[in-house]
Amino acid sequence: MTEPRYTPLRDRHEALGASFTDFGGWQMPVRYTSDLAEHHAVREAAGIFDISHMAEFIVDGARAAEYLDYALAGRLSVMAVGKAKYSLLLAEDGGIIDDVIVYRMGEQRFLIISNAGNRDAVREALTARTGSFAAGAPVPPSADGSFGFIAGSSGDVAVDDVSDDYALIAVQGPKAAEIVAAIDGIDEVSVPWDEQKYYAWASARYRGKPLLLARTGYTGEDGFELLVDAADAAELWDAALAAGADHGLVPAGLAARDTLRLEAGMPLYGNELSLDTVPAQAGLGRVVVADKERFVGKDALAGGSTGAGAQAGRTLIGLTAEGRRAGRAGYAVVLEDGTVVGEITSGALSPTLGHPIAMAYVDPSSAEEGTDLFLDVRGTKIPATRTALPFYRRKK
Amino acid sequence: MTDLSNLKYSEEHEWVALEGATATIGITDFAADALGDIVFVELPEVGAEFTRGDVFGEAESTKSVSELYAPVTGTVVEINDAVVDDPALLNSSPFGDAWLIKVEVADGALDGLLDRDAYVAHTEA
């Protein structure tokens, strides 16, 4: 048993009265006051989350972009500097090792943010792939027509796990931009505040040290994720709370984060995503750029692999129901006669919508329109309606 | 405000207030806090009979589901519709407005339940 880990914001959470829960080996705030109040605050004003448990990697080198096209499912080389992109790290058999956000920091430099619980697996895969990438001769010409003379050398690309150096704070909600712009101590912002786009980032300084202002998040709302030196995290947290005091900003925990991301139809690793799931099953086929010359997992996906777990023929769907009884992760999805056709991966009574919502893997034949599906809520069959994801979409 | 020292408690975090042969049953603030925001409550019908330890209902929060265990043996004579309509009462007033059911019990119904000090010690264990 390893010791539970705490983020640099532990004493702030304790002072705010947070309840803690284990998440990927970390003791994280699950709520401060009320799950529902925190959830509604993010939808209506803003919430601040400590997500310092998440892992960060720097990928750097002359062939970093080309390497990521090989190591990840997406085509990262075409992404402009300053942008961010959601992508997947696949196993050789097409199963999902993790879902990640990739930020292009420079022509040859990328930041990858991955899930806390997958930090070791992501580091190992990324590191191992620098070798198999370099070994993958012949090297295609780069965009400017020159050849990669350093192919095969370890100098092509380097992967650095910087998770312990940084803290990550998310400010999410319709007031987030206004609040982050008002945080005292942030300066040298590289992109004017009113020109910062969703799924893009700006560099800045906080107390003289590098600060990443990424306009990304996991709640379905506008918002920022602030990557800051771990030593300065507590001061930045305080400054953000102060900046948000008049805008309805509240600290929000993992419970609210989970209902928010579920409403937004965002998959959670361990619930919707796993090594036994290939992207298409999870509705993430669009994330895979199959016409790339080579990438890890390509052969398996081309061959119709359904991942290591042999859970062939299942597809992720959204379901809604009436009333207030929610289907929960692990509950069966059944037909009228009780035949089990699937399983819920995430479910809750949607705080925003007021009715139960769930994501579930079902047999594709049962995912067709016109099939009457039911949630087996501890023995009671509750009629469910297939619903396109996301359940909730913010107003632009 | 209810005098909590007059109540009896189960290790499953229900409280019992006995008046004559009628036991009023609810869940404790400790249970309500642990559940988080309670959004759904299912209670039995009037007339349902329970033996101590039976599941008599459910409380669901945004994150979890908890079964409610009968702390006494008896017959349900009344249920609290207010808490079914507004389960958040369980968070705001677990010892007051958010009682769950009233049960007709026999003598000795409270035997083996905890007093306040023992219950507090149980929650701190």
Image (spheres, rainbow, N blue to C red):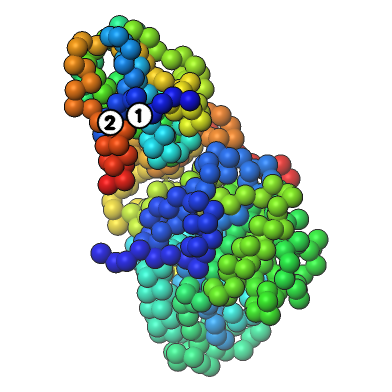
Pick the quarter of the image with the N terminus of chain A.
bottom left
Question: Which amino acid lies under the numbered mark 2 shown in the image of this protein?
Answer: Asp
Q: Nearer the viewer, residue A208 or A246?
A: A246
- Disc 1 to disc 2, how far (Cα)? 7 Å
**Looking at the rendered structure, which numbered label has been put on residue B55?**
none
Question: Percent position (x, y) of residue A250?
Answer: 62, 49
Lateral position of residue A291 relative to residue A90, left or right = right
Q: Secondary structure at mark 1?
A: helix
Q: Which quadrant would residue B60 be assigned to in this image? A: top left
Residue to which mark 2 is pinned:
B115
What residue is shown at x 23% (from left), y 27% (from top)?
Answer: B113
Q: Kindly indicate whether the residue at mark 2 contacts the one at mark 1 (C-beta within 8 angstroms).
A: yes
Name the residue at 39% across, 65% down: A5
Horizontal side of residue A385 vs B79, given as left or right: right
Residue flagged by tag 1: what amino acid is it? Ser
Instruction: State which quarter of the image contains the C terminus of chain A.
Output: top right
**x then y, percent, for residue A29:** 47, 54
